[in-house]
Amino acid sequence: MKIIETEIPDVLIIEPQVFEDKRGFFLESFNERAFQEKANISAHFVQDNHSRSGKNVLRGLHYQIKQPQGKLVRVIAGEIFDVAVDIRRSSKYFGQWVGVKLNAQNRHQIWVPPGFAHGFLVVSEYAEVLYKTTDYYAPQHERTILWNDPDIGVGWKIDLQPILSGKDQAGKLIKDAEVYV
Ligand SMILES: Cc1cn([C@H]2C[C@H](O)[C@@H](COP(=O)(O)OP(=O)(O)O[C@H]3O[C@@H](C)C(=O)[C@@H](O)[C@H]3O)O2)c(=O)[nH]c1=O
């Protein structure tokens, strides 16, 4: 596997080694030892999630203020633009974002550490997204930052209004949101 650094050092892109043969392909989507040794990610995952969304669906930007979740995200059908926003007030990257294309062809994964808000936009007809999390879903701690907060300025490259949940339409601006210390 190959590790690709991003503008925010704690956010990493993982390119797995893919073994192709006449039957199809094989890859290791997670290997605790390799992630530890090659990427210095020592994550203990407790939950696996799977969602499917249609084109122009935008989910995010989500985080849990208590029980923060690190997320290892990948796409098995279609393509998304996946975004991590550093919301650790003490970080020199506070308010900055990283965006990466994840699709079923490049099979890239993004490591979104605890302390980040996370979201994605579906750019293909539909997309199926799988992700592992380092803590359990805790709806009482769940928070949403508005996807188009101008102080963050994520470059979603979308020319029409995305399809959002009610919760995401009511997201807060980062300046008003409860963030990490
Ligand atoms: C996230 C989540 C949702 N649910 C339920 C609650 C609700 O009825 C339904 C849909 O939930 P949501 O609208 O919150 O789903 P969604 O908008 O896909 O939320 C997810 O977005 C991405 C960007 C993330 O980073 C995730 O951590 C998570 O916040 O699924 C669970 O049971 N477990 C979970 O872990």
Image (cartoon, helix red, strand yellow):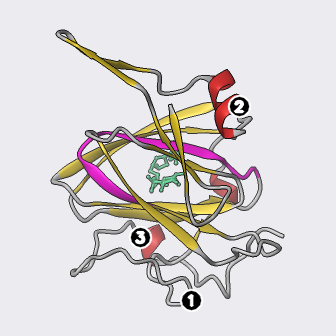
Q: Distance between the residues labelled 2 and 1?
A: 34 Å
Crowding around mark 2 (Cα neighbors within 10 Å: few <14, some 14 to 19, many 20+) is few
Looking at the rendered structure, the kind of residue marked 2 is Gln
Residue 109: x and y, percent? 46, 42
- CA–CA distance between discs 2 and 3? 38 Å
Question: With respect to residue 15, does 57 lie above or below?
Answer: below
Instruction: Give the number of marks.
Output: 3
Pair 1/3: label in front: 1
Image quadrant holding the C terminus, namely bottom right
Q: Which residue is drawn at 67% across and 88% down?
A: 175
Q: Where is residue 111 in the image (x, y as percent from the top left)?
A: 57, 47
Q: Residue at x 58, y 81 (%)?
A: 172
What amino acid is labelled 3 in the image?
Answer: Gly
- Under mark 1, the amino acid is Asp
Residue 108, by quadrant, is top left
Region rendered in magenta? 67-82
User: First in sequence: mark 2 or mark 3?
Assistant: 2
**Does label 2 or label 1 sit earlier along the sequence?**
2
- Compared with residue 12, is residue 77 higher up or lower down, i.e. above or below? above
Asked which secondary structure carries label 1, the reply is loop
Q: Give the quarter of the image for residue 24.
A: top left
| Tag 3 residue | 166
Q: Can residue 43 be seen in this view?
A: yes
Cα separation between marks 1 and 3: 22 Å
Q: Return the mark for residue 36.
A: 2
Residue depicted at x 54% and y 82%: 152
Q: Is mark 2 on a helix, strand or loop?
A: helix
The secondary element bearing badge 3 is classed as helix
Q: Main secondary structure of the magenta part?
A: strand
Q: Where is residue 145 in the image (x, y as percent from the top left)?
A: 56, 74
The residue pinned by badge 1 equals 151
Give the x, y percent position of residue 158: 26, 76
